[in-house]
């Protein structure tokens, strides 16, 4: 399906030295099963493999030093964020190949997640546009930063192998009779104070909360604004939380805060300053892919 004329995607020339980085463990080895590297090489795309225990940042730096003028990555959202940060720093195109488990960013970008091999056409027959990036304390993110219950779950050792079970166990631990909510403080857009909320989710552009068919996706990635969702402990007579949009948010905490950044466990020193970087990243996708998020296609 071609992109809409007003979608912002523009045809571009293929790069001279494209590089694809493949996370070999993402999606349970999805890239290997599809022989993705072989398909990339037939398109004259250089391939580098990230093995378990290797540093992705070091591999990206090596690719850039070798003259890469377009960086692609086949992996989960955490891997995407590392490579996108390098592409942003050098203002070169970034290509997302949906070889992760859920591929949330690919879905919002308008990539056909079922067309893994066809996604490589972003390098050879691609269209390009600029999208926003989120940033928290100098750390860039493509999707979101989570604090509170979900962030605590991400830090648990068994999270990768049993995400739902670990999250439920963390909820019981935090919200149980002896539970202690993370020490967080912020003010929302109407000046209401939120002390020790159970969930804070700051996203690079807002998620669609009013479109049941496409909840969990973002209609836009270039609105120039953060999406913010805060959930408090249930209290009689008070709303349990609030959702709003803003270009920035400060979260105070007395201690180093546990966070989940694009699903990866991180620790952040206070205060936590979240901002949007409008149009900070050049992205390319296949010209044959939709180029719009499912929620953007709904009325």
Image: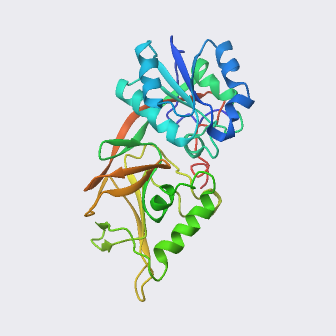
Residue at 37 percent across and 46 percent down: it is 224
Image coordinates of residue 243 in percent, x first then y, are 42, 65
Residue at 62 percent across and 63 percent down: it is 165
Q: Quadrant of the N terminus?
A: top right
Residue 79 vs residue 94, the one in the foreground: 79
Residue at 42 percent across and 18 percent down: it is 64
Residue at 43 percent across and 78 percent down: it is 233
Residue 229 vs residue 146, the one in the foreground: 146
Horizontally, residue 159 falls left or right of residue 282, namely right
263 shown above or below 283? below
199 shown above or below 97? below
83 shown above or below 18? below
Q: Is residue 64 visible?
A: yes
Q: Is residue 187 visible?
A: no
Image coordinates of residue 290 in percent, x first then y, are 63, 37
Horizontally, residue 66 falls left or right of residue 52, namely left
Image coordinates of residue 250 in percent, x first then y, are 27, 58
């Amino acid at each position: 399906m071609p992109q809409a004329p007003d979608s912002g995607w523009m045809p571009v020339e293929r790069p001279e030295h494209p590089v694809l980085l493949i996370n070999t463990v993402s999606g349970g080895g999805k890239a290997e099963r599809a022989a993705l590297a072989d398909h990339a090489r037939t398109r004259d795309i250089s391939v580098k493999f990230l093995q378990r225990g290797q540093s992705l940042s070091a591999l990206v730096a090596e690719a850039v030093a070798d003259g890469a003028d377009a960086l692609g990555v086949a992996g989960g959202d955490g891997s995407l964020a590392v490579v996108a940060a390098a592409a942003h720093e050098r203002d070169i195109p970034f290509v997302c190949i949906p070889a992760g488990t859920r591929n949330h960013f690919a879905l919002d970008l308008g990539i056909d997640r079922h067309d893994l091999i066809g996604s490589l056409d972003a390098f050879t027959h691609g269209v390009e546009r600029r999208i926003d990036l989120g940033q928290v304390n100098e750390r860039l993110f493509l999707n979101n930063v989570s604090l509170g219950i979900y962030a605590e779950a991400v830090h648990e050792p068994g999270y990768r192998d049993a995400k739902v079970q670990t999250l439920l166990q963390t909820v019981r631990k935090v919200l149980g009779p002896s539970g202690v909510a993370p020490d967080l403080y912020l003010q929302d857009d109407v000046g209401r104070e939120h002390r020790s909320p159970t969930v804070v989710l700051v996203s690079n552009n807002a998620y669609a909360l009013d479109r049941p068919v496409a909840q969990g996706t973002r209609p836009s990635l270039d609105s120039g604004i953060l999406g913010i969702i805060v959930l408090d402990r249930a209290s009689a007579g008070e709303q349990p939380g609030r959702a709003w949009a803003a270009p920035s948010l400060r979260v105070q905490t007395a201690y180093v805060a546990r966070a989940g950044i694009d699903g990866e466990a991180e620790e952040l020193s206070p205060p936590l300053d979240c901002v949007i970087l409008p149009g900070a990243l050049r992205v390319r996708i296949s010209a044959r892919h939709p180029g719009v998020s499912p929620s953007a296609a709904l009325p």
